Amino acid sequence: MPGDTAAQEPLFSVVKGEPTDVELAALAAVVLSLGTSAGEGKSKPSVRQWVRRQQLRLAPTPGPGAWKRSRG
């Protein structure tokens, strides 16, 4: 059955020591949280972020003296 979780392979196994149920739950939470962020990747900046950068003049602006502004 596809919904049967008992038939699936374990996510990880303990090979040394005797962790408590709380320690195993914490480890499982960390491992699962790492897996979800890896699939998302970087998102495009929103329009609000671009407007904010433009207002702060963070983008390089061509013209006289541009080399002075480019050193950051």
Image: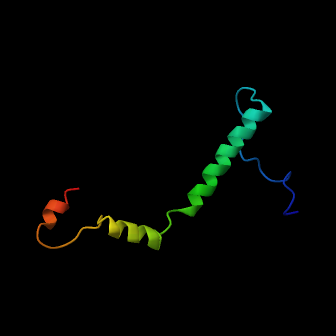
Q: Is residue 63 left or right of residue 32?
A: left
Give coordinates of residue 41: x percent, y percent. Answer: 52, 62
Q: Where, quadrant-wise, is the N terminus in this rendering?
A: bottom right
Q: In this view, does 29 lie to the left or right of 50?
A: right
Q: Considering depth in this image, is 20 or 60 the residue closer to the camera? A: 60
Q: In this view, does 27 lie to the left or right of 45?
A: right
Q: How many labels does the image show?
A: 0
Instruction: Name the residue at 18% across, 73% down.
Output: 62
Q: Which colour scheme is used?
A: rainbow
Give coordinates of residue 9: x percent, y percent. Answer: 77, 50
Instruction: Name the residue at 85% across, 53% down.
Output: 7
Instruction: Name the residue at 70% across, 28% down.
Output: 16
Give coordinates of residue 53: x percent, y percent. Answer: 36, 66
Q: Where, quadrant-wise, is the C terminus in this rendering?
A: bottom left
Rendered position, 67 above or below 15: below
Residue that protrudes farthest toward the left in the picture: 64
Q: Is residue 64 left or right of residue 33?
A: left
